[in-house]
Every structure is written in C-alpha cells, then in structure tokens.
Amino acid sequence: MRASGHRVIGSSGEVRARRLFGCLLMLALVLALTSCSRKPESGGELRVTIKTDPKTLNPLMAEEDASDRIRYLTGGVLIRVNRKEQENQGELAESWKVDEGGRRITFDLRPGVKFSDGSDFSAGDVVATIKAALDPSLHSPKGDPLRAGGKADVRALSGNEVVIEFEHPIAGLERLFDEIAISPERVAGKADSSVVLGPFSVAEQRAGEYVLLKRNPYYWKKDSAGHQLPYLNAIRMYVLSNRDTELIRFRQGDIHLIDGLPPDLYEQLHSEDSGAARDLGPSIESEQLWFNQVAKAPIPVYKKTWFRSRNFRRAISLAINRSDLARVAFRGHATPSVGLLSPANKFWFDQNLKPIPYDTNAALDLLKQDGFTRTEGTLKDRNGNPVNFSLITNAGNKPRERMGSLIQQDLQQIGINVNFVPLDFASIAERIMKTYDYDACMLGLTNVDLDPNGQVNVWMSSADLHQWNPAQKSPATEWEAQIDKYLRAQASTLDRAERKADFDKVQEIAADEDPMLYLVDKNALVAVSPKVKNADPVVLTPQTYWNAEYLSLEK
Amino acid sequence: MRILSAIGRHLLIILITALVGGLLGATLVRLAPGFGIQESDLNAQLSAETRKALHKEDAGERNVLSYYGHYLGSLIHGDLGYSRSMDRPVSELFRDRLPDTVESVVIGVAGGWLLGLALAIPASWKRAPFYSASATLISGIFLCIPSAVLALIFLVIGSPGKLAIALVVFPKVFRFSRNLLVKTYTMPHVLTARARGLSSARIFGWHILPNIAAPMLALAGVTVSIAFAAAIPVEVVCDSPGLGQLAWKAALSRDVPLLVNLTLVIAIVTVAANSFSELLSPAATRDVL
Amino acid sequence: MSRARWIATGVLIAVFVLALFASAFAPAPYAKQFRNDTDHPPSTQFPLGTDELGRDRLSRLLYGMRISLLLAPAAALISTALAAIIGGAGAYLGGTWDRATNMFIDLFLSLPWLFLLLTLRALLPLDIPPFTSVVVTFALLGILGWAASARIVAASVRSIRSSEFLLQARAAGCKPSRLLFRHVLPNVKPILLAQFWISVPLFILTEANLGMLGLGVTEPLPSWGNLLRELENYTALRHSPWLWVPLLSLVLVVSLFQFALGTEEPA
C-alpha cells in the first residue's frame, strides 16, 4: 500500500521530500564546484501551495488559479507586466512597437535565448504560439482578449522580428502578452510546461499532492553580478486547500510562502512572531453587494421596484458602516471601497471619487423621497410593504459571513430586516445565473486585470456577467447605456489619458447609480518565512513569488 | 452448502443494493441545485464564447435514467466513467486515493474499537460508579467535539490527523457496548449463573458472549460506515488525498460520474461489512443451519 | 433516588431555567454587537468574553442552549423511535421482512443525503423565519439519523428472537405481544438509550454544520453548535481557554441528563 498522508509532517512523503532536497543540494554543490565560481546564493527547494490540482499544464489553456501560477513560474513571455511597478517590461522581446492605431504590434526578440531543453528559441516559436492562442477552435482563455481584435495575421519578419496585425485595434494590447507563454513551435497549443522559456519547468506532478518545478538551467536572465538565474533549484507546490493546515505547516517550516492569507490567520501569525506576516495594503480585490434587478426574476414586483430605484440602492449604501466592515469583519485588514476600482490600481483608479460616508440620516432622507416611511422601527414602502430582503453569500468565507451579520445589524438601524443566508457556491451560482431567485447577493468577484478592458465582461449591459441584470438586449436604463458608451470609447483609442478620462466617467456613473455596492478593498496579506531571501511581496498575484527567479533560501 | 447459498444470497443483496443506491445517488445529485455549473462560468476575465467552450459537456448526465443505463453499460467493460470536475478518469482517481482512505478507515475502526472496549468492559464488570462516570464523561467529550476540530488538534501537535477518525468512532463503540454489556450482565440467567458461583471467564464465555455477539458484530459493520463518513471532514481538514476529500470536492462541483461511483463504493462497503458480520453472528448461523 | 441523582436533577433544572429565561439572565441581548470590544477576554461586563463581532458570549450560550436543548432531544427521540420501529419490526417478523429491512437500512446508510438537504434548501424560500428553519433542520436530522442504530437493534432483536429464554417463553404459550413488550423490548432498551444519548450532541453539532448549506439557525440567532464551531479556531484555543465553555457545558448537560435519568446504573 502506498504510504499515505504525504501532507502530514513526519510521514514518508516528507522523508522522500527531504531526501530529494538532499540530492538537489548535493547537485548544487557539485555544480558550484565544477563551475569554480561561487554563486552568491543558490540552491534549495522553495515550498509553496496551490489550492487545487492544476486543471491543465498547457499555459495557453490556464484559466484557474493553480494552472495560472504554474504558467507564471514556467512561461517565458514577450512582455511582462511588472507586478511591483505595474508597468510593461520587455522579456523575450527586447523591445516592441505598437502602431496602425493599435492594430499592429512588432516585437524585437532577444537573441541567444534557449529553451529549458537546450534548444534554440526563434521567431518561429513565437509565431506558432500566438497562432495557437488565436486559434478559435482551441478556445485558449489566454488568447481570448487577443481574439477580440478579429482576424489576425502573425508572421516572422526575420529570425528575431515578429509582427502581428489585427483587424480591429485592441486597447492596452501589450499587457495581453504577459499572459502568453511561448512554447516550442512543435508543441504550440498543446504544450505541457516541461520545455519552457521561464525560470522553472514542470518536472513532476502527483495529483492531490504536489507539482514539482525544477530550475531551467538555460534561463536567459542573469543577476546584476552576472550570475545565472534562478537561484533556487526547485519549487514544490503542495496542493493544499485548507488554510489552517497551510498555516500550521508554515509554522513548522514546511512551507515558505503564503499568498492571500485570510485576515484571521494573519492575525494569529502576527500575534506570535517575527515579521513573517505582512500586510501590503489594499489589493485590487474587492467585496461587493448587488440587488437583483432582473425583469423576469421570481420575486415580488414591489421588491423589484425597490431594487430598481437609485435612491433605494444609494440609501442602503449610505446605511452600511464600511469602516466597521473593514475593522471588524477583516480585522482591520481592508479599506472601505470608494468605487469599482481599488486605489491599488495605481493608474486607472479615479482620484475624483469621494469616500462613501456612513450616514443613516442621509439614507432615510433618500428613502423618504421614494415614499418609504419608518413606523415603530420598521421601514415600509409607499404601499405599506415592510422592507425586508434576503442576502445570500457563499458559506465558509469567514470575513464575508461577518460582513453579512454587520450589514444585517446596520440596516436594522433604519428599520430594514435582512435575512442573511450563506449557501454553498454551486447553489449561489444557480440562483444568480439561472433561476434569479434571490433578492441581494454579496460576493467578491475577483479582478486580476489592471486594465479597464478587464471590466467589460461585467459592466457592458449586454454581458452575461452583468450580475444585477445580465445579458440585456438593449440597455435597460439610461445610465447603463452611458456606461456602455464610455466603455466602447475607452476601448477604441490608444491614448492612455483619453482612455483614462473615459473610464473615469464609467467609475463616476457606477458610483452615482450604485448597481453594485462596493464594500471594501481587501488588503493583500502574505506570510514570508525569514528563510526566504530577496522576497519582495506585492499586491498583485503571485504576491510572494512574482520575482521567483531572484528568490533563494538561507542555508 | 447452506453456508455457500447464504453467501450467494448476500452477494446478490450487495449487488442489488449497490445498483439501486447508485441510481438513487445519481438522482439526488441531479436534482440538487447547482448541477451543471462550474466555476469558470463566473470568470469575468473570459468572453462569453470562451466560457461556453470551457464549459464541460454535461448533457449526457441530464437525464438520470439514460445516464445510469450508459454508465452500467460501460461499467461492465470496467469503465467507471470520466470525472468532469477533476478532468480525469474515475478509475484513475480511485486507484490513487483508495489506499489512503482504506488506511484511515482501518486505523479509525481498529483504534475506535480498542479504545471503546478498553473503557467499556471494565465499566460493565463491577459497580464502580466513579470509574463509570469518568469513562462516560471522556466519551462524552469526544462526542461533543466536531471531528474537524479533533483533526486540527492532531495536526497542531504534529501527528497524523486521521487518528481523529478513531476518536470519532470510539464514543459510539463505548456507549453501545457498555450499555449492552451492563444489560446482559443483569439478565436473569446470568444472575443465576453468578449465584451458582461460576467463574467470571466462564460466565463471559457461556452467557455473555452468545448474547452480545450479534449486536456487537452489527455494531462492527456500522462503525465502518461511521468511519467512512468521518473520513470526509477529517481528510478535508488535513488535505489528505483520499476518497473522503474527493467526495467533498465532487459534492461541491456536483460531479455526477464521480458521485455515482462513490455511492456505489460506499454501498458495497456498507452492505459487505454488514453481511460479513451477519454471516459471522451466531444468530444467523443458527438460522442457516 | 440517591442524593447524587437529586443533585444532578437540581443542576439540570437550574440549567433549564437559565436557558428558558435567558432574557432575564443574559447580560446583553444575544445579537448586540459591541463593535469596539470584539474578541474580548472575559471581564465583569462579558463573563465569557465576546465573539468576533463583539457579541456577549454568555448571552449567546444561554440563548443557544434554549434552542438546542429543546430541539436536539426531540430529534433524537424521532431517530431513536424510527430505529426501534424499523430495525425492531423487521428483525422480529424475520425471514424476508428481515432481509428487506436490512437492505433498506444499508441503502439508507450509503446514500448521499447532502444533496437532499441542498435540494430542500432550494425549495424553501430564502426569507423563511429563523425558527422554522431550525425546526425543519432538526426534524430532518431526526428523520435521517436512525439507520446506523437500526442495524444494531435489528441484530439484537434477531439474537433475542432465537435465544433460549425466548424459546422457552414461547413454548410456555406466551402471547406475541407479551413476548415483544416483556422480553424483546426491554432487551434492546440499552441500545436505544445509547442511540439517544449519542444523537443529542451529534445533532447539535450537525445543525451547526448545516449552516453551510443555508439550513439550521440563521444569523443573528445563536445555537450551541455554532458556539462549538468556534473551537475550529485552533490557535485561539491555546490563548482563550474560555472557548471551551460551550463544549464543557454540553458534555456536562448531556452527562447530567444520563445520570439524572438513571440510564447509567444497572437496572
């Protein structure tokens, strides 16, 4: 029988890991001796976690978090969005040029780059990979935004020059190449991350246990002293979905880095030690609440009338004590939201937006305008219906469940009775996407793209993830038509300042109409073992190992 | 011969129970909300078209009866089907994960019985109220702690979390067997035997054992299902890659092929464990012979 | 009754009074959030500290006990009765009946009931009153929780049915009803009692876990089970021993009950 409990400390899996670790150390030692130059820091196996098994190792097909993290660590890309500066920087492309009004991009490839198997990297690989990403029959999630540019022509101009011409312009085109890992021509579209251009390649995968990445000995990057990167010999990504267990193993030294630590666990770690827990300030992830405005929803008509009223939504927004949400539900590790973008999105955040006050009197005034009255502590609409609604959210997310209880109590203050119902995720999804049988829903729709184009699938009235009233044939309201207009405008120009002005408009209309009540921007919380050198965690994913090639372990 | 026919009858019962269980299981999953929804359906980074393309085909599972017919058809050829949520053949998942869970269940059942009997037998022998009360208290404590908490405590002190299963099984073994023993020791014929001055060992062997054997064996069969059920939260907390964790993931993603096979496995294990204990029990033997 | 049993009964009555008149004894309303005093250690104002939302834990325990003490034994009674009826009847009738009952029990033990609960939640309206939701949940637990012990009851009845003393009783011309009530039932009573006492804390815990499915007690109503789930915060356990109080009180109440009702001592 296979030894079980690989994730349990002291089991045989652990012994095996240590043995492997030992072998790798020996290997590193031999390498160091033969090369006769002492590297400043090298060797070691960094251990991190992924929440699930990766669904795919094909970098073009990565869609969920685990696959995407592996893609990030293994894939060599033409342009990287620097996770710290939030600016594009050349990687496999030494330089690039966008012209023809955003319809054409030309890359100058870095010479002398090799794949992890030692074979040469050439323009052919880039052409083949991008063609695969654009191939409509492959349905690559990574190529998805590129396919928005219509028909495309990809060709190599020379051995180190590649040009792509699109039918339509794509705003913010360069950043999209951060997601596209270049694979060898012969496997383009069906690559498995074993032959790569990134700092690590996939060496072994054990379902339910771990994915082992080993160092790419031919990686093109060198450090400032001219030493070959990456320093680490390997990265072991344990499949670990339980956050408590993850923290226990971090404490026991078995895991070196934790991304996206829940606030409660952050507090635990913080209370006991050592600077391992770090709060990096607001991330670009937020929590939001929306009311069901779907015309065919099976809820009473009078409720639909409330939810469609801007005054009602605004009043609810004003009656929620956001700073308490941040302070109590997130233990102080969140910031009250101002609007649909977080201030962590340095360039696109609209500086003109004002903080949303907590003001029950203003809320009651707005409600009065709509004919609501408060008698004996209960709010009633103009037809005498007492105001109550159910609020659903996914169970198991502690801060979110706490927010529900806080909101329930806040709204009680203005006479609204909230029935707070946590459900399992699939049941939530069924209600918000299929049956529309709910009043209000609170979720954190993750946002990983800094560019406003990443918001189109939510904010366009025709989008099917336009949660409060999805897939409208034509905009249901005037303000949704306005948002559509500005979203299209920002996508049709290359001028960053012009795009920003357009998207600021979107942010202002959204803040004024409140179809989505943005509650808090979550802080990025991470844990970094003191053993890890050169760690420089940032708010964008992968927070702690975005600079994996520079990380090393203290011996 | 009669024993053989009894075994044959039990095998038939296993088969029928498993088949009916599988169908009912598939129906329950199919009817539950959230069937046919996967997480990428809500990924706002993707265009509607790509989301649709990524959505795994579930049309074959919509009609439960035709799905189950197909499933049984390929089951005969040894094909357990394909898990949508894990994107792997079910047989592969089972092969990888079964050993882990079997080990947990064996440890859990064995440990639970050892602990339970170790406390129950002395508690029933003599009238020692203090001992009896404290044994009840200990078993009561473990009955009241959530199994996930037990597993976490084991992890924190650096031992395998699956030991928690033994602590989940233990109070049940203790309570049932203690009550049974106490009752049997006070039955008229045992009291008579005692009065006649028979030795404790003889009383136990002649008068107690035959009376408690059948229910105790039934309890043994039932503890297997209890251990299986406890393996789910424990494996989820410890992230140990066994069937319990698989069952939880399958439940969250309404993975019909995976859940049907799991129901089948659980049904087979349950019926087999119970049939086995029945075949061993003296009452059944008397019935047969 | 012995003096110890009187004391146990006295303590239990006191607990019941405390729980029933929670509003009189609780230091604060159970839902009131003292948002500036979250996770407060015990003090004169908050004898058991406050929870993560700043709600007084003692008040929540008292109110939580009320619901759980009322409903969990009721559900345990349902499941024990079902175990006795289904397991006992099948085995007592014997033959095909016995086999069919066993098959039914095994089938029942192996079905994924989670999905039935999910479906039920989908069928119930979202704005169902909290109390109805708890009652429904406990009723379900009672209906679904009988199978394991029915198995043991059946085995026990089967062995009694074929035991010598019953054969003698039958030979002596004892009526079937008298056989059932005088000889069979008294002998499965200890198993049913074990089932009952195991079910009470088990159902209290399960009710809290069903909160994940949107069943059971809904916010801001407290339940004993939800207070027990606070134990999942394992580091807090080391620093805040008062989190064990709900657990200890549950163990105590269940043990006292058994003691007071005299199920502990040989009859």
Image (tube, coloured by chain):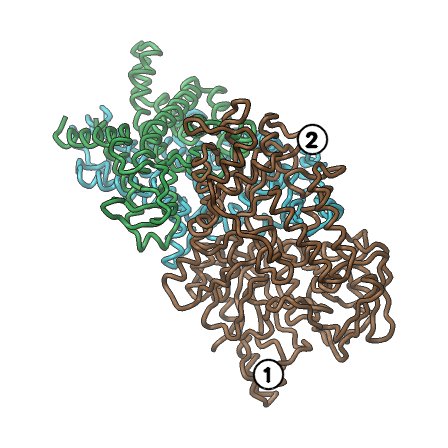
Residue in the foreground of this view, choosing between B120 and A35 = A35
Badge 1 element = helix
Q: Chain of mark 1?
A: A
Residue A15 makes an appearance in the image: yes
**Residue at 63% over, 35% down:** A293
Q: Quadrant of residue B207?
A: top left
Q: Please state the horizontal and vertical placement of residue A393, each as a whole percent of the image.
A: 53, 41
Q: Residues within 10 Å of mark 2 (few under 14, many from 20)?
A: few
Question: Which labelled disc corresponds to residue A399?
Answer: none
Q: Quadrant of residue C17?
A: top left
Q: Quadrant of residue A106?
A: bottom right
Residue C107 makes an appearance in the image: no
Q: In the picture provided, is B21 more to the left or to the right than B284?
A: right
Disc 2 and disc 1 in contact, CB within 8 angstroms: no
Q: In the picture provided, is A339 more to the left or to the right than A335?
A: right
Against C74, residue A514 (above or below) is: below
**Residue at 61% over, 62% down:** A346
Tell me what hue chain A is rendered in: brown
**Residue at 70% over, 60% down:** A59
| Residue type of the residue flagged with mark 2 | Asn
Residue at the bottom extreme, as displayed = A36
Tags 2 and 1 on a common chain: no
Distance from disc 2 to disc 1, alpha carbons, whole Å, reads 60 Å
Q: Please state the horizontal and vertical placement of residue C74, each as a whole percent of the image.
A: 36, 25
Question: Which labelled disc corresponds to residue A31?
Answer: 1
Instruction: Quickly name the residue at label 2.
Output: B63
Spot the green chain and give its letter. C
Spot the cyan chain and give its letter. B
Residue in the foreground of this view, choosing between B223 and A555 = A555
